[in-house]
Image: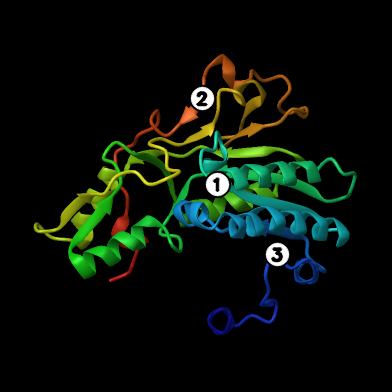
């Protein structure tokens, strides 16, 4: 908190220390607020498997607190940042994010002035606790990278892209929509090789450690069960809604052209990814 204040040095910025599990503190944080971006989560799959009750308290109870507090304080809009792991979840983290999506979307049906929407996306490259900083640290300490499976694929976008998409969502007038970012995916082995090219050397090793409990080989952003209610929404999104507005109701749903939207279908070349510029960890 002190570092944030010093870095931004803006009287309009108010830093509040608290816990999303504490309704009173969440209610206090929502006072005189126009837009809430909900990114609070216990997000690591293996940790959620090991400590399920803690994950539930943060990801489900915390989201419930946020919905209640936003309505009580007449917040204009709540934008929940969800995860591809919420789609067809097989691990506890994904299940809690799926429940969180339902809680947010239910908020749009409670008759308040607050609008609610969900953005379901993949992994932000270089975000706190994510794989790229971890790999860079591994190279510096052990000159190796560990991956779980050479065939594993994941969706990725850069941090500037993620921020831009959030601000685009603030301009939407749709209440109760689940927005899905259109984004490229890659094999984790390919991403590992790009990281080694920038931060390793000819002796840097890749160690395959095996898939961990709760992990998928490929991720899904729109399931085949959701495509009948999914529509194109501009260049950046698909939107999943059972109540399409005038902009959507004349469009064909995605099940006419796409069974599901998964990371294996959208593999991209990584040779143009600006790794060195994106992750200045040296």
Residue occupied by mark 2: 260
Left or right of 64, for residue 57: left
Quick one: label 2 or label 3, which is nearer the N terminus? Answer: 3
Outermost residue on the left side: it is 202
Q: Residue at x 24, y 56 (%)?
A: 145
Structural crowding at the residue carrying mark 3, measured as other residues with C-alpha within 10 Å and reported as few (<14), some (14–19) or many (≥20): some
- Tell me the SS state at disc 2: loop
Q: Check the picture and name the quadrant holding the N terminus.
A: bottom right
**x and y percentages locating residue 134 in the rendered image:** 34, 62
- Tell me the SS state at disc 1: helix
Left or right of 105, for residue 267: left
Q: Residue at x 26, y 43 (%)?
A: 190
Single out the mark in the foreground, 2 or 3: 3
Residue occupied by mark 1: 92
Structural crowding at the residue carrying mark 1, measured as other residues with C-alpha within 10 Å and reported as few (<14), some (14–19) or many (≥20): many
**x and y percentages locating residue 279 in the rendered image:** 35, 63
Single out the mark in the foreground, 3 or 1: 1
Residue occupied by mark 3: 21
On screen, 215 above or below 139?
above
Single out the mark in the foreground, 1 or 2: 1
On screen, 210 above or below 78?
above
């Amino acid at each position: 908190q002190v570092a944030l204040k010093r870095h931004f040095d803006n009287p309009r910025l108010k830093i509040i220390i608290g816990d999303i599990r504490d309704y009173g503190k969440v209610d206090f944080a929502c006072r005189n607020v126009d837009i809430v971006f909900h990114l609070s989560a216990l997000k690591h799959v293996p940790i959620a498997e090991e400590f399920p009750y803690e994950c539930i308290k943060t990801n489900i109870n915390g989201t419930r607190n946020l919905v209640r507090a936003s309505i009580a304080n007449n917040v204009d809009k709540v934008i929940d940042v969800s995860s591809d792991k919420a789609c067809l979840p097989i691990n506890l983290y994904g299940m809690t994010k799926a429940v969180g999506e339902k809680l947010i979307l239910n908020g749009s049906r409670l008759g308040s002035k607050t609008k609610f929407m969900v953005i379901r996306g993949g992994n932000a490259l270089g975000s706190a606790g994510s794989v790229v900083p971890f790999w860079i640290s591994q190279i510096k300490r052990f000159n190796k990278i560990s991956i779980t499976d050479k065939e594993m694929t994941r969706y990725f976008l850069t941090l500037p892209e993620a921020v831009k998409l959030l601000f685009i969502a603030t301009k939407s007038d749709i209440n109760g929509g689940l927005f899905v970012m259109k984004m490229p995916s890659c094999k984790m082995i390919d991403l590992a090789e790009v990281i080694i090219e920038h931060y390793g050397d000819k002796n840097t090793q890749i160690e395959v450690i095996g898939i961990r409990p709760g992990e998928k080989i490929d991720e899904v952003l729109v399931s085949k069960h959701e495509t009948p209610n999914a529509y194109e929404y501009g260049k950046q999104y698909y939107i999943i809604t059972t109540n399409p507005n005038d902009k959507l109701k004349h469009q064909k749903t995605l099940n006419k052209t796409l069974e599901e939207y998964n990371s294996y279908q959208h593999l991209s070349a990584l040779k143009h990814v600006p790794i060195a510029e994106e992750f200045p960890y040296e």
